[in-house]
Amino acid sequence: MKEVNNKYYIKLTAVTPLSVGAGNEEEWVKCADYVIHDGKVYVLDLHRVAEEGVDLAKLSNLFLGSDHDGIVNILAGKLETVSAFVFDLPSQTENNIKAFERSQFHNLPVVAGSSLKGALRSILFKYLRDYETKNEEVFGTMKDGTDFMRFIKVGDVEMPATKLYNTKIYNLHSVDGHWQGGWKHALVNGTNDFYRSTGFNTLYECIEPSVNGFGTLMLSSTDLESVIQKVGASAHGNKKMNILHDGVSAFFAIVNDFTRKYLQKERAFFEKYPADRTDDILDCIDHLLAMIPSDNSSCLMKMSAGVGFHAITGDWQYEDYSKTGVHENGRHAGKQKYKSRKIAETPEGLALMGFVKLSAVSEDDYCAYVKNIEDNFNAQMQGLLEKKAEAEADAKAAEAARLEKEANYAGCIAAALEAETAGDFALALSKAQEAIELFTNRDEASAIITRCESKAAEQLLASQQAASAAAADAAREQKVAGGLAALLNEKFELGDKVGLYKVADFKLCFQKVAQWAKAAKLDALPEEQKLALTETLKRLLAAPSKKEVKDLKNRKSSIWRNVEKWLSASTADEMFESVN
């Protein structure tokens, strides 16, 4: 029974890793778009980086210098926060990462309707084409409105998430004049039989198998009928009308027939040119063939990255992929045509890239999916708004704290300057130190500290000198107050001389007298001090040393000059006579 409504709701399910590229300009470049740390790939968002207060000038210099470790270090602890996406790293690579196309509004991975339509176009080209029709006439032309693909409209399919997959190139190479299968590990002469994950490998951002998205498919038979009535039937008009009119199951049948034949030829290719791990690829192909339903309730098709020459051109040129001929001219001259395949690593083994399953769903299922996307998007937006409000509140609080800190700093500086002017350098130093603790990199407080430390040192020295002078004055006053008797009659209190007079000779006696007189600021002795000196001299005359006996008998000796100086000449004469 033919469908009445020609608009269908479809579910797209990734069967093998699916990458819908956003073009070379959207490749992620290491040290410019992403960094690797602890087995993770962090795709950076510069807006988030700026919001986290990272020094963008310093970061830009690291980007320019491709300083990967420097970038990781400057973002340490913030990588999760400043990244738009975080992926597990499947393998190391020297190549850029191929990014997935994203929707502008929701920023979700999107299988563009144009990409789906392009894959379907290749399939329909083969279905419509015959050997009597020129290639350019198969679909009609835009000029007269007969271009067949105008009547097939495919909506975008947003997908929920992506992950990174490592890919390798399976390549034919000539060994002793015979073509053999192998894995490409380098650009020049780098193909051999052995598989390894690294070396000429590329990471793709992909939809992983079993992940679903929903879209629409419009088969506009009514529009085609209107065009035919105006300009007449185009080539293959009946087949085109049937495609649009017979319903989605018939449409799926065309796709499945194409895919089945393609996979069978791919299987024959890998069987003819085996290499290390081609058993994995053959298992993948068998699994894909088994997925094609006999009732065409769904369809299996290959699209986008890794689609290969045969699928992208409608697969009408070669019935046997091992017999594609060789290039006759150019840099590939002598090499076999269409000899390479893009193969993805998966947890289950190696797989051909880009296979998806399309199945029809109800409008309710489609609407529920769209609502879920909108709900998730709104929740994310709400989260972002809350985060923004929180960030603004934090910024406001930080600004208030900064202003308070500035005010405290200004107050400390003013107090320090006032104390410095008043000569209170200790207080000035204390206030300047408080200012330094608020802002360590400001010169004003440091200058105050430098000045006041110098002035405080001068002040301390002056104080010490004054104290020393005062102590000397006190000592002098004490000596003066005690009189000569205290100085001349002082005795030893410890040691083997305990109880003996300290002043035991004339020389020391007169030194003590001179010191006392200087401290008392006297040139002559008062009578009471003369008496004390006279008593001491009598004590010393009673038991002079051998040297002093000689000096005492010499009227010109220093002993008698000191007696004359401090007592009188007559006293000196009297004492001299007593000695002699």
Image: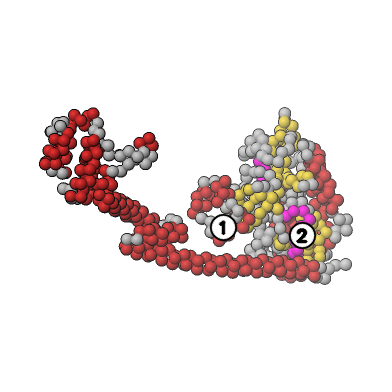
Residue underneath mark 1? 49
**Who comes first in sequence, dot 1 or dot 2?**
1
Total number of numbered labels? 2
Q: Which mark is residue 488?
A: none
- Name the residue at 65% across, 47% down: 38
Which is nearer the eye, 470 or 162? 470
Which is nearer the eye, 547 or 136? 547
Location of residue 217 in the rendering, given as x and y in whole percent from the top left corner? 76, 64
Which is nearer the eye, 424 or 387? 424
Amino acid on which disc 2 is placed: Asn
Location of residue 292 in the rendering, given as x and y in whole percent from the top left corner? 84, 54
Magenta stretch prevailing secondary structure: strand
- Name the residue at 58% across, 59% down: 48
Q: From where the camera sits, is residue 314 visible?
A: no
Q: Is residue 339 magenta?
A: no
Which image quadrant: the C terminus? top left
Q: Which mark is residue 212?
A: 2
- Name the residue at 62% across, 69% down: 385
Amino acid on which disc 1 is placed: Val
Which is nearer the eye, 498 or 211? 498
Magenta residues, as a range? 200-218
Tell me the crowding category of disc 1: few under 14, some 14 to 19, or many 20 or more residues within 10 angstroms, Cα based. Answer: some
Answer above or below: position of 318 versus 134.
above
